[in-house]
Image (tube, coloured by chain):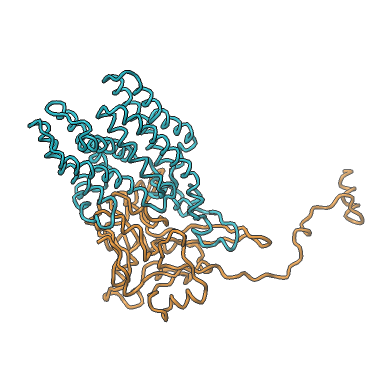
């Protein structure tokens, strides 16, 4: 069914800490690895050894630069995957019922055997969270590692999404946003977690944490120290300048 | 957005086919016998050809029947259901006109109404997408509906009606372009809101997530050809509406109507190409490309 559930019992999702992310792309690789070997069609690469390789990924890390007034520019690594929106536009546009949002935990999934590969859901997503697999011609998206988080054959510490499990910086957190006492809810409240493109009205479940305020040092004006020798310099520098000029 | 030839053919051909079926169903032209065979054949043929072209866009056309199930939420599914229903409901009227020389107006009217709603549903597939601000506006459906009705009126040789519809179509296209040019800014989406970092300062992409192309860029970030947007708008306006309208003023004959129709189709192909090529998806903000 491609109508959205009015409410979901749980709201499973991710908190992504833009302050902590070091931009190593380990989450991208672990995601590709797990989701190629497990649930659904493998994530294909096309022309992997050719001149123009490309492939399907469920998680990608962009890097942005923020130019600030009266402060040095800031580099922000920005991982992006499906936000498992409450009002997911990708689900309602699906003509076949392949896309759905689960009532029990709010995860947005694609039933690949029902997908006709029309691509309309990818068009409807403002975030670019869905990619058509180049080989299988079905829509691929983040499953929140639905085959890990409930998987009792895995050790308990592995029952979280592969991207979260692998992040060496601890920049990714997984939990239930419907529970106000959960780790992710508290983190969002404490750090001012925000939605991406709220104006699109999608009500994303995943939250992003802003970079923390940077320390400011009481520093002298470095630019004045970097000035080249001023013209008409006096004293030793002036003498050196004139002597070298004469050579 | 990527202007896929299959989608351009689908929207233009099935639009004009259903447009013709609207006028045939309403009985504005009530052909019987061989003429009915030709005209209904043309209506069904164009509508069907458009739908088949759309199927070529699918990754798994063999599962296309599943697309009839989600009409409660999906405009694409509604379009599939409505298109099939139109063809089915119209068929007694068409068959009776051809073989018994007796039009069946009730089936005709019902079919005409369904055909009109089908064209509207086609437009809504695009209009509903909020992530493409240029499309997500009330000026989009009138362009689709008027283009289909004008083309259909020409096929049905309803000269005065076609003339009138072509002129409104021209106004609708201009309104769609003028409104469309402001839509991205009106959507409020910027790289700042996309990253949520607007409060910190000016945000720009430093490094893209991958060095090559990907599905998102190919499908949704189509920048080639936009530089000719104004020329193409002029072509769409002149060929799609004004020139056929002038040709219809000439003494009516099959030649002038055929010529007008041909010119109109060429203009509408340009308009539809531009409809996709010009539309910017907000995902481009993550790539500093639109």
Q: Quadrant of residue B234?
A: top left
Which residue shows up at 20% across the image and 37% down it? B25
Which residue shows up at 32% across the image and 71% down it? A7
Q: Is residue A84 visible?
A: no
Q: Quadrant of residue B264?
A: top left
Where residue A147 sits in the image (x, y, percent)?
29, 68
Where residue A114 sits in the image (x, y, percent)?
22, 56
Q: Is B108 or B192 nearer to us in this picture?
A: B108
Using residue A98 as the reference point, say whether residue B288 is left or right of it: right
Q: Is B87 or A242 nearer to us in this picture?
A: B87
Where residue B97 sits in the image (x, y, percent)?
12, 33
Where residue A180 sits in the image (x, y, percent)?
42, 79
Q: Is B16 or A179 nearer to us in this picture?
A: B16
Using residue A50 as the reference point, say whether residue B28 is left or right of it: left
Using residue B30 as the reference point, say whether residue A191 is left or right of it: right
Q: Is residue A208 above or below residue B272?
A: below
Q: Is residue B161 above or below residue B86?
A: above
Chain with orange colouring: A
Q: Is residue A92 visible?
A: yes
Apparent colour of chain B: cyan
Which residue shows up at 24% across the image and 61% down it? A1
Disc count in the image?
A: 0
Q: Is residue B235 above or below residue B195?
A: above
């Amino acid at each position: 069914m491609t109508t959205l559930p009015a409410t979901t019992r749980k709201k499973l999702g991710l908190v992504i800490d833009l302050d902590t992310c070091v931009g190593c792309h380990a989450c991208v690789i672990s995601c590709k690895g797990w989701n190629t070997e497990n649930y659904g069609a493998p994530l294909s690469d096309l022309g992997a050894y050719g001149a123009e390789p490309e492939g399907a990924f469920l998680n990608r890390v962009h890097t942005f630069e923020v130019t600030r007034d009266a402060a040095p520019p800031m580099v922000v690594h920005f991982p992006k995957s499906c936000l498992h929106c409450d009002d997911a536009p990708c689900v309602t546009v699906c003509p076949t019922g392949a896309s759905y949002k689960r009532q029990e935990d709010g995860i947005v999934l694609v039933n690949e055997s029902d997908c006709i590969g029309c691509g309309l859901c990818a068009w409807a997503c403002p975030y670019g969270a869905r990619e058509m697999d180049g080989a299988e011609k079905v829509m691929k998206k983040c499953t929140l590692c639905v085959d890990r988080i409930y998987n009792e054959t895995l050790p308990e510490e592995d029952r979280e999404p592969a991207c979260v499990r692998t992040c060496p910086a601890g920049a990714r957190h997984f939990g239930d946003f419907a529970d106000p006492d959960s780790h992710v809810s508290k983190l969002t409240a404490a750090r001012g977690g925000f939605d991406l493109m709220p104006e699109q009205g999608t009500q994303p479940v995943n939250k992003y944490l802003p970079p923390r305020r940077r320390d400011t040092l009481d520093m002298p004006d470095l630019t004045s120290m970097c000035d080249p020798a001023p013209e008409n310099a006096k004293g030793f520098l002036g003498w050196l300048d004139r002597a070298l000029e004469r050579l | 957005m990527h202007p896929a030839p299959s989608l351009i053919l689908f929207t233009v051909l099935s639009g004009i086919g259903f447009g013709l079926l609207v006028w045939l169903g309403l009985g504005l032209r009530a052909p019987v016998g061989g003429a009915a065979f030709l005209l209904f054949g043309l209506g069904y043929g164009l509508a069907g050809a458009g739908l088949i072209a759309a199927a070529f866009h699918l990754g798994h056309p063999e599962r296309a029947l599943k697309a009839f199930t989600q009409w409660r939420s999906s405009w694409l599914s509604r379009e599939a259901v409505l298109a099939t229903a139109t063809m089915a409901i119209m068929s007694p009227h068409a068959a009776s006109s051809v073989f018994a020389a007796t039009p069946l107006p009730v089936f005709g009217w019902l079919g005409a109404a369904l055909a009109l709603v089908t064209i509207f549903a086609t437009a809504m597939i695009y209009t509903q997408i909020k992530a493409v601000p240029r499309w997500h506006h009330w000026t989009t459906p009138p362009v689709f509906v008027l283009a289909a009705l004008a083309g259909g009126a020409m096929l049905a040789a309803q000269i005065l009606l076609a003339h009138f519809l072509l002129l409104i179509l021209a106004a609708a296209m201009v309104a769609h372009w003028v409104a469309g040019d402001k839509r991205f800014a009106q959507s409020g989406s910027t790289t700042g809101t996309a990253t949520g970092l607007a409060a910190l300062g000016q945000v720009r992409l430093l490094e893209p997530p991958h060095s090559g192309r990907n599905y998102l860029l190919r499908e949704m970030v189509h920048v080639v050809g936009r530089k000719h947007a104004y020329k193409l708008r002029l072509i769409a306006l002149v060929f799609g509406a004004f020139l056929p309208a002038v040709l219809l003023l000439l003494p009516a004959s099959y030649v002038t109507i055929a010529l007008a129709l041909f010119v109109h189709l060429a203009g509408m192909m340009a308009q539809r190409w531009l409809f996709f090529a010009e539309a910017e998806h907000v995902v481009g903000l993550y790539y500093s490309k639109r």
